[in-house]
Amino acid sequence: MRRGSVPAGTGSSTNRWPPTTPPCPPTRSIPGSTAWRPATAGRNRPGPWAKWLCMAITRHRFGWLFAVCLLAALALAAITVQWWQRPAPDRAGPPSPAVLEARVTRVIDGDTIVVRTRDEREETVRYIGINAPEIDWESDDRRGPGWAARTLNQRLVAGQVVRLELDAEPRDSHGRLLAYVYAGDVFVNARLVEEGWAVTVRIPPNDRHFHLLLDRQRAALAAGRGFWGEAAAQLVDWQAAGEYIGLPATVEGVVRRVHRDRQSGIIFLNFGPNPRRDFTVVIRPPFGELFLSPEERYLNRRVRVRGIVEAFQGQPQIVVQLPEQIEVISSSR
């Protein structure tokens, strides 16, 4: 039989083989209606954006690259939306510090108090981030800076209900509670420093307010408040520094040796031939970062150092925190 001819017995010239139109797809009824429609009607029909995308991918020279970039952009958009829609606590800053309330029952010195908590516990509290001058309890002389720091501390907190803000480590090796102390709106640690009766110390990880306290010390030093003013008025030769232990003074001399301990990072400025006995300036970490090239700046130069003269194993020394405490007068020559 020739292609396109009508098979015998069909009785009609309109029925060609193969059919010129595809057979109708299966039909189904629409619930609630007597109408009929093809089962695939309205399904799997690409929209205009899908048609445009297919044409861009198949007909363009770099269609595959366009597809990859588009998928990456969609993925990035989905990640961004999920990030912004995550719960609010995930976007919050660091957790709020623990805060206790207690009544001060005794002021020991410029940076230590005794309190009674709401549950009737008695705690010794050491102020974080500062160090007040020591008190010579064996001496009857109460004119030293340690007594002045204690007097200011009493005026700020004695008998009051204070807030104790804790840091990363709540206690020290002596079992004392470590805290930033607030009496009403007064940040007591900072007030002692800015009035010139305490210096800044940094003992990680409890260093939340370190930079604030250091700025307060710099301001007190520049203004000559507290013992900084007393030190400026007391000029002492380095050989006589041992006579001023526990007192503020400005010690003058020539730096004969600059040594940086590799293990501890402490910088020592030695004024005499015996580095273990003669007067020395001590710069502890992290304050050493503030002193640029101490070897070049201080070695063989006459300087004046301001601070509290302390004794370490019988050796007089001044521990400094700021470069402003050391004034270069001239070279040794």
Image (tube, rainbow, N blue to C red):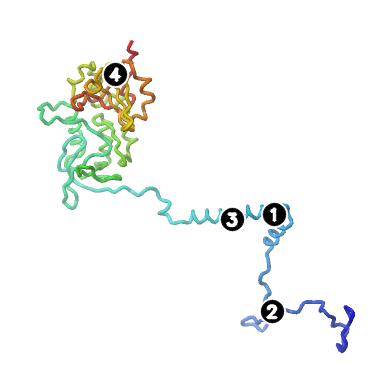
Answer with left or right where residue 226 lies relative to residue 1: left
User: x, y percentage for residue 274?
Assistant: 24, 19
Circle number at residue 37 = 2
* Residue 219 seen anywhere in this rendered image of the structure: no
Pointer 3 or 2: first along the chain: 2
Which mark is nearer the camera, 2 or 1? 1
- At label 3, counting other C-alpha atoms closer than 10 Å, the crowd grade (few under 14, some 14-19, many 20 or more) is few
Q: Quadrant of residue 54?
A: bottom right
Query: Residue at 28% of width from left, 31% of height from top?
Result: 194
| Image quarter in which the N terminus is found | bottom right
Q: Considering the numbered disc 2 on the image, is that residue within a helix, a strand or a loop?
A: strand
Which mark is nearer the camera, 3 or 1? 1
Circle number at residue 63 = 1
Pointer 3 or 1: first along the chain: 1
- Distance (Cα) linking label 4 and label 3: 66 Å
Q: Considering the numbered disc 3 on the image, is that residue within a helix, a strand or a loop?
A: helix
- Distance (Cα) linking label 4 and label 1: 76 Å
User: x, y percentage for residue 31?
Assistant: 62, 81
The residue type indicated by label 2 comes to Arg
- Distance (Cα) linking label 3 and label 1: 17 Å
User: x, y percentage for residue 19?
Assistant: 81, 79
Q: Which residue is mark 3?
A: 74
Pointer 2 or 1: first along the chain: 2
The residue type indicated by label 3 comes to Leu
Q: Quadrant of residue 201?
A: top left
The residue type indicated by label 4 comes to Arg
Circle number at residue 100 = none
Which mark is nearer the camera, 4 or 2? 4
Residue sitting nearer the eye, 200 or 84: 200
